[in-house]
Image (tube, grey):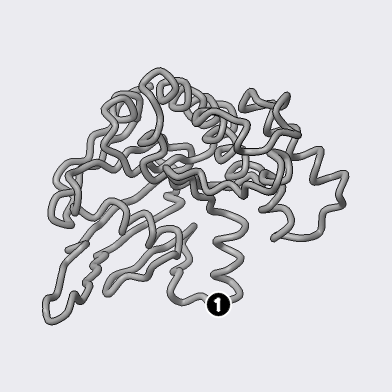
Amino acid sequence: MAQMAILSLSGLKKLYKKGEIEVTALAGVDLEIEKAEFCAIVGPSGSGKTTLLNIIGCLDSPSEGTVRYLGKELKALGEKDLSSYRREHISFIFQSYNLIPVLTVAENVEIPLDIAGGFTSAQKRAKAMEILAAVGIADKADRYPRELSGGQEQRVAIARALVKDPVVVLADEPTANLDSHTAEEIVKLMKKINRDRGTTFIFSTHDKMIMAEALRVIELRDGLVTKDERRST
C-alpha cells in the first residue's frame, strides 16, 4: 500500500518581474514526494529546478499553487509555524558549502542545534561528533575549513544538514565544485545516509552521476514536469 506523501505540490507557478518583462520560472508543477526518496530534479539551466527547491524549503513562495507537508498547507501556516517547519524538518546542502571560516568543523556542525536551542554544550558536541563519524571525518572535528579539501568541506556541510535529523534534505548542485572522484564518494555517502536513516533527499542537479544513482528522476523544462521516472532499488 502506498504511503502518504510527505510533500504534495499542486499547481505550483512562480513568476518573476525583470523590469517590464515577466519571467515564468514554474508554469504549473504537480508532484508528490514520499518519505525516504532519493530524487533528482534535472533539466537545463532556467528550467525551474532551484526555484522549486527554494519553494519547498520556504526560501521563496509560489505565485500560485500549494505546497503541503504531511497534509498541512504551508502558506496557511503562520510565521512561527513556518520557521518551525524550516528549522525542524528541512535542511539544505549547497554547492558553495557555506561554512563559517572562524569556527571549527564541530562548531560549524553545531550551528543548527544552536539555532534550535535546548541543548547543552556537551549534548551539542556529542551529536556533532556522532554525525561527523557517520560522514567519515570525526578526526577533523577541531580543524578549520581552510585546512580541509573541497570534499571534506562538503562532508561537513552534509553533517551540518543532518545533525538535527531532518525529514527532507534539499541539495542544490552539491557536487558542482568537486572533482569526479570526490563527487562519486559524496553521492555514495548521501545514498548510504538515505538508506540507513530514511532521510529524503531531493537534488537539483546537472550531474549525470547523481542522475544515475537517483531512484527517481524528475525532468523540468520551461517550468513544467516533462518526465517522472521511478527506478527499483
In the picture, residue 179 is in which quadrant?
Answer: top left
Q: Is residue 70 toward the left or the right of residue 49 in the image?
A: right
Q: Is residue 148 toward the left or the right of residue 168 in the image?
A: right
Q: Is residue 185 toward the left or the right of residue 219 in the image?
A: right
Q: Nearer the viewer, residue 118 or 70?
A: 118
Residue holding disc 1: 79
Q: Residues within 10 Å of mark 1 (few under 14, many from 20)?
A: few
Task: Work out which quarter of the rendered image holds the C terminus and state it.
Answer: top left
Q: Is residue 137 above or below residue 17?
A: above
The picture places residue 108, in percent across and down from the top left corner, at 67, 46
Q: Nearer the viewer, residue 10 or 183?
A: 183
Q: Is residue 170 above or below residue 155?
A: below
Q: Amino acid at mark 1?
A: Glu
The picture places residue 215, in percent across and down from the top left corner, at 34, 29
Q: Residue at point 35% right, 36% down?
A: 176
Q: Is residue 214 above or below residue 32?
A: above
The picture places residue 133, in percent across and down from the top left corner, at 70, 26
Q: Is residue 233 above or below residue 143?
A: above
List the single residue furthest toward the top.
Answer: 181
In the picture, residue 214 is in which quadrant?
Answer: top left
Task: Work out which quarter of the rendered image holds the N terminus and state it.
Answer: top left
List the single residue furthest toward the bottom.
Answer: 20
Q: Secondary structure at mark 1?
A: helix
Q: Residue at point 54% right, 70% down?
A: 82
Q: Residue at point 56% right, 62% down?
A: 85
The picture places residue 181, in percent across and down from the top left corner, at 40, 18
> How many marks on residues?
1
